[in-house]
Amino acid sequence: MILGSDRSPSRPAAIAYSPPWRPSLPLLLSSLSLLSLLYLLLSSRAPSPGGRFVTDAELSALVRAEVSRALVPHLSASSASNLAGVPSSPDHAALGFVVAQVPESERLRVLVTGGAGFVGSHLVDRLMVQGHEVIVLDNFFTGRKKNVAHWESHRNFQLISHDVVEPLMLEVDQIYHLACPASPPHYQYNPVKTIKTSTMGTINMLGLAKRVKARMLLTSTSEVYGDPQVHPQPETYWGNVNPIGPRACYDEGKRVAETMMYAYEKQSGVEVRVARIFNTFGPRMHPNDGRVVSNFIIQALQGKDITIYGQGEQTRSFQFVDDLVDGLMKLMNGGYSQPVNIGNPQEFTVKKFAEHIRELTKSTSKIKYLPATEDDPTQRRPDISVAKRELNWEPKVDVKEGLVKTIEYFQSVLDEGGEIVPTGQGAVKPKGYKAPSGR
Ligand SMILES: O=C(O)[C@H]1O[C@H](OP(=O)(O)OP(=O)(O)OC[C@H]2O[C@@H](n3ccc(=O)[nH]c3=O)[C@H](O)[C@@H]2O)[C@H](O)[C@@H](O)[C@@H]1O
């Protein structure tokens, strides 16, 4: 179900459905050939790497997971494997989705703000497959309906077009509060709005959490450490942030959002969780997002120059989106309420990363050096001891493995849509975004 805001936040009005996603003929054919190959391989009863033969049940589970991946756009591998063997939901069997049947008493109502965005939509997939009722709230500034369109007819799913800056009344058990543009060119486009999103948006969600006694998780960021003087960064590090620089609208917005979380916990007893997310990549990243992973892959795949800002000696540590979703859900459902870094400590200089992408894409793109961006952090790597100890979480997907999947995704986007001009430096509105009148 998709609802649209009539600017009266508590009474969203219906808007038109976008047609459900249908697989294109070439995609179906390539998926069918993949399936035949899988069948031939497995039915020849080759021993598995562990020396066992593949059983019929395993074969059918693998085939179902592959069908799911073929039919649902950019379903992540782990979501697909979660589907295998789970009882079918009649609503989504046709799409290859298998949603767990959860008794009413165990089913949660989960609100995901920013749920139509890159990270949010992967989280929504996982929650839906677990059989929960999921309400997605998005203002579609950087989020896209197509990221969650495959759920639109499911009875457990609701999409509300709404801006978190406006209050909202709902009955929910858990709130994953993701809403906020995260790419520097996009969060700098309208810095006042970015600040409002992190401050007023978080206050609104905390007010809701307080009223309905929901547990609330804030997706904070590694950017609360600013340009860190301590490396790697533990949660106990207070950071080095320029409060009036171009990144401040985001960094300081998230810092005050964290402050509000703990103030509501202390003063009103709201159950809070805070994840500090480090650089994340994967399928469904916006191709015009302007961040390093999407830019380098798109440039390399098209043979365009790979643009490095500065000398490329600055470092980042990259995690695949599936790992992040695991971490967020463990944090939400565990007993630890202090901030937790969720990231993959595999660290690269930006220059090394550019070379890595060039190799993986077999590209002949040249590297082009552009001026450094103002206040760009010089180093970033998470200390994940707390996540390991308190959540029993650590990343499972190797960066290279995640990049291969992401490259496949961007290749399919290029195949479908043609040339992409990546977003460069400086503040810019997300491509395709039209501000509602009066804003
Ligand atoms: O991806 C993320 O998860 C993080 O991305 C950004 O932080 P930042 O690390 O600055 O992200 P990028 O824009 O991807 O930049 C990473 C590095 O690559 C460089 N870069 C970026 C793009 C490009 O085309 N070329 C290039 O050299 C940047 O200057 C920077 O040093 C956001 O601010 C974070 O909130 C978010 O968590």
Image (spheres, rainbow, N blue to C red):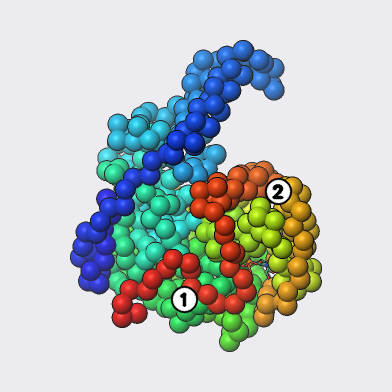
Secondary structure category for the residue under label 2: loop
User: Residue 214, image x and y in percent?
Assistant: 35, 58
Dot 2, crowdedness within 10 Å: few (<14), some or many (≥20)? many
Q: Residue at x 33, y 41 (%)?
A: 106
Q: How many marks?
A: 2
**Quadrant of the image where one finds ligand 1:** bottom right
Q: Residue at x 53, y 50 (%)?
A: 413
Q: Nearer the viewer, residue 239 or 421?
A: 421
The numbered dot on residue 194 is 1
User: Residue 49, image x and y in percent?
Assistant: 69, 22
Please state, as top left, top right, bottom left or bottom right, where the C terminus lies in the image.
bottom left
User: Residue 16, image x and y in percent?
Assistant: 25, 56
- The residue beneath circle 2 is 361
Q: Residue at x 35, y 60 (%)?
A: 137
Q: Nearer the viewer, residue 276 or 86?
A: 86
Q: Nearer the viewer, residue 368 or 91?
A: 368
Secondary structure category for the residue under label 1: helix
Q: Say above or below: 435 vs 411.
A: below
Question: Is 45 on the left or on the right of 178, as rendered?
Answer: right
Question: Is 191 on the left or on the right of 410, as rendered?
Answer: left
User: Residue 172, image x and y in percent?
Assistant: 30, 56
Q: Say above or below: 196 vs 280.
A: below
Q: Residue at x 54, y 22 (%)?
A: 36
Please report whichever mark, 2 or 1, sits nearer to the chain's N-terminal start: 1
Q: Is residue 5 visible?
A: yes
Q: Say above or below: 47 vs 224.
A: above
Q: Nearer the viewer, mark 2 or mark 1?
A: 2
* Quarter residue 20 falls in: top left
Q: Is residue 293 visible?
A: no
Question: Is 405 on the left or on the right of 140, as rendered?
Answer: right
